[in-house]
């Protein structure tokens, strides 16, 4: 009887709803709208090398807790009440995690670490319980994952109890442990390691979930531009900066969704080992994509507040770095899912490097326009290239 009850918690692969993203999963994502907003504001408020490192660490953590949840709901059905309960609890903890971000390296370090560990370890143990007697391979897989997350959790909690520099070191160790897990197959002495064949994911589901997170980040970039524009007196310059930020965000949307996501979803859904593609293309390659959008949102704030600034290498790094990270992530993502990294993206990165040589002598808002132009060039190049390939394939 117990096995039957647990089996009802799993998605039915191949059924009409087996890969559908549920409304509860979309509701769950609302917490991460807040997370992304907090991260971009934290980076803008503490825009120093140390502040960037701290914001980067928290971005890695937020993405990791989200993508692990996306993997779990790939197997567990959010329409089942126990799974719903688990997601609602994770939402509450995620809200605490997000609210702690601005002071994570201050007074709320233990709160941030505690919420994070409860989310990671609690969700993984729930999956162990749900898989017991139902899927032997996934049961062992989640036991291994729980061990890795538990070991990392010791460093997260220890970091929350330590002072600033020691906290940063402890949390970097914790994050390194967690990120090494999938690459090592979550090897545990006596339990062996997982293989990509064990990760029988629904490609359509994991692709759609990742795309929705990209939408969250793009939405934050739109909100930053709109909110800042509304708070400033209208002028031709603010209008130009607003339009520049908007066009850049649309360019990012186009580059990711027009060809990248569409081909990736098709490839992973029809691949014999979807877990291998999901690990590289969605679990890892999306990190620079998301980081690039967040840095871009910060650069838009700087373009509004320091439009005529010249020679500030930190602000220049945000303007060029946001676009650069985004292109590098898409290069990795598309290369992993198509087998051939797009030449257009490599060309775009070369253009950004060339812009870096003139950046110290160029006003920030002009540099923003030039980096946006790079995005548009890459988008047009890729569109022309892939459209030409499609025509050639049709003729043959």
Image (spheres, rainbow, N blue to C red):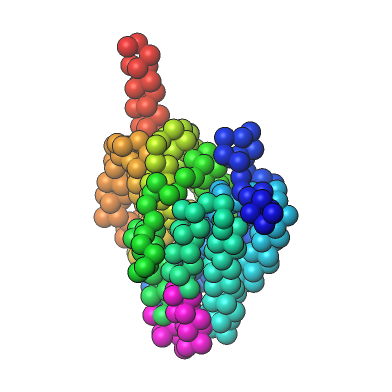
Q: Quadrant of the C terminus?
A: top left
- Residues 25 and 162: in front is 25
**Residue at the (51%, 81%) spot, across then down:** 157
Q: Magenta residues, as a range? A: 151-169
Q: Is residue 164 magenta?
A: yes
Q: Is residue 346 magenta?
A: no
Residue 139 image position (x, y, % from top left): 51, 58
Q: Is residue 84 above or below residue 251?
A: below
Quarter residue 28 falls in: bottom right
Q: Quadrant of the N terminus?
A: bottom right
Q: Is residue 68 above or below residue 75?
A: below
Q: Is residue 49 above or below residue 371?
A: below
In the rendered image, the residue lying farthest to the top is 395
In the visual, does 168 lie left or right of 301?
left
Residue 120 image position (x, y, % from top left): 54, 67
- Residues 366 and 11: in front is 11
User: In this orientation, does residue 184 appear?
Assistant: yes
- Residues 274 and 134: in front is 134
**Residue at the (39%, 37%) spot, across then down:** 272
**Residue at the (35%, 32%) spot, across then down:** 381
């Amino acid at each position: 009887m117990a096995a039957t009850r647990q089996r009802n918690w799993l998605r039915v692969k191949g059924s009409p709803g087996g890969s559908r993203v549920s409304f509860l999963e979309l509701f769950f994502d609302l917490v991460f709208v807040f997370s992304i907003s907090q991260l971009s504001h934290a980076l803008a408020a503490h825009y120093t090398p140390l502040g960037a490192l701290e914001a980067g660490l928290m971005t890695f953590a937020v993405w990791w807790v989200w993508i692990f949840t996306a993997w779990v709901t790939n197997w567990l059905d959010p329409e089942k009440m126990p799974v719903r309960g688990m997601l609602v609890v994770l939402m509450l903890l995620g809200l605490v995690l997000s609210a702690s971000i601005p002071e994570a390296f201050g007074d709320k370090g233990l709160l941030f670490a505690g919420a994070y560990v409860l989310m990671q370890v609690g969700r993984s143990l729930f999956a162990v319980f749900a898989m017991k007697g139902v899927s032997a391979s996934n049961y062992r897989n989640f036991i291994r994952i729980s061990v890795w997350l538990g070991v990392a959790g010791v460093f997260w909690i220890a970091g929350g109890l330590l002072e600033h520099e020691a906290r940063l070191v402890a949390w970097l160790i914790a994050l390194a442990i967690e990120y090494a897990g999938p690459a090592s197959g979550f090897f545990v002495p006596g339990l062996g390691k997982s293989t990509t064949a064990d990760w029988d994911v629904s490609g359509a589901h994991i692709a759609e979930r990742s795309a929705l997170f990209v939408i969250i980040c793009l939405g934050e970039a739109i909100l930053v531009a709109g909110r800042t524009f509304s708070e400033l007196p209208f002028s031709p310059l603010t209008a130009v900066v607003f339009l520049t930020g908007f066009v850049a965000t649309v360019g990012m949307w186009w580059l990711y969704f027009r060809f990248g996501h569409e081909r990736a979803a098709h490839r992973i859904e029809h691949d014999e080992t979807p877990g291998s593609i999901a690990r590289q293309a969605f679990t890892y390659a999306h990190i620079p994509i998301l980081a690039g959008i967040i840095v871009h949102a910060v650069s838009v704030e700087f373009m509004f507040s320091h439009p005529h600034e010249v020679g500030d290498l930190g602000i220049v790094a945000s303007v060029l770095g946001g676009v650069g990270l985004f292109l590098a992530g898409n290069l990795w993502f598309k290369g992993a899912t198509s087998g051939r990294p797009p030449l257009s993206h490599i060309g775009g990165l070369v253009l950004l490097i060339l812009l870096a040589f003139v950046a110290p002598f160029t006003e920030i808002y002009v540099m923003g326009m030039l980096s946006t132009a790079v995005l548009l060039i890459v988008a047009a190049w890729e569109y022309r290239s892939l459209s030409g390939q499609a025509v050639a394939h049709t003729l043959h």
